[in-house]
Image (tube, rainbow, N blue to C red):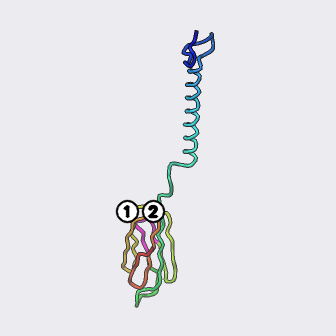
Amino acid sequence: MRKRGLPRPFVDSPGRVDDICNTEAMDLKYLARGAAAFLVVGAMTGCNSGAESGSVSVEVRTMTPGAQGGPYEVKVRGSDGELVNSREVSVGSTYVIEDVPYGWVSVEATSGCTVENELTSESPTMRMIIEAGNCTLAD
């Protein structure tokens, strides 16, 4: 005879497993399904939480007095000192260089000026303004 309120720990009849065993099997089944769904969603969306690169814009307002009027060459270097991109920029133009890796970035112009700033996920853009012989880092 069975007491009320207590689970049945044994098999009632041949081929039938107790309720406790069924509950544990069902819990494991749902847990496995949940883990599989999580892995599928993770694989579809990728592991990155966002982009790992930013952009640098270069604006040329005026040339150095007495300069030939040709374009400046601008070089963007990453935190390891490697050249990320280089481009010729001319007066009155603004250029944007995309896919610059996060970290400390330096921008050099042939006018002789260099600016440095850190690109992060909170601050993914950098803007350099060339005005005559001066370079300014702007927001």
Q: Main secondary structure of the magenta part?
A: strand
Identify the residue position indicated by label 2 in the image: 122
The C terminus: image quadrant: bottom left
Q: Residue at x 40, y 64 (%)?
A: 78
- Residue 134 lies in the magenta stretch: no
Q: Describe residue 63's horizontal placement relative to residue 45 as left or right.
A: left
| Amino acid at circle 1 | Ser
Taking depth in this image into account, of 56 and 33 the one nearest to the observer is: 33
Secondary element at tag 1: loop
User: Image height check: is 31 above or below 134?
Assistant: above
User: Image height check: is 20 above or below 41?
Assistant: above
Separation (CA) of disc 1 from disc 2? 17 Å
Q: Position of residue 8 (x, y in %)?
A: 56, 16
Q: Position of residue 4 (x, y in %)?
A: 58, 16
Q: Position of residue 121 (x, y in %)?
A: 46, 60
Q: Describe residue 10's horizontal placement relative to residue 137 as left or right.
A: right
- Residue 77 lies in the magenta stretch: yes
Identify the residue position indicated by label 1 in the image: 79
Q: Residue at x 47, y 75 (%)?
A: 58
| Amino acid at circle 2 | Glu
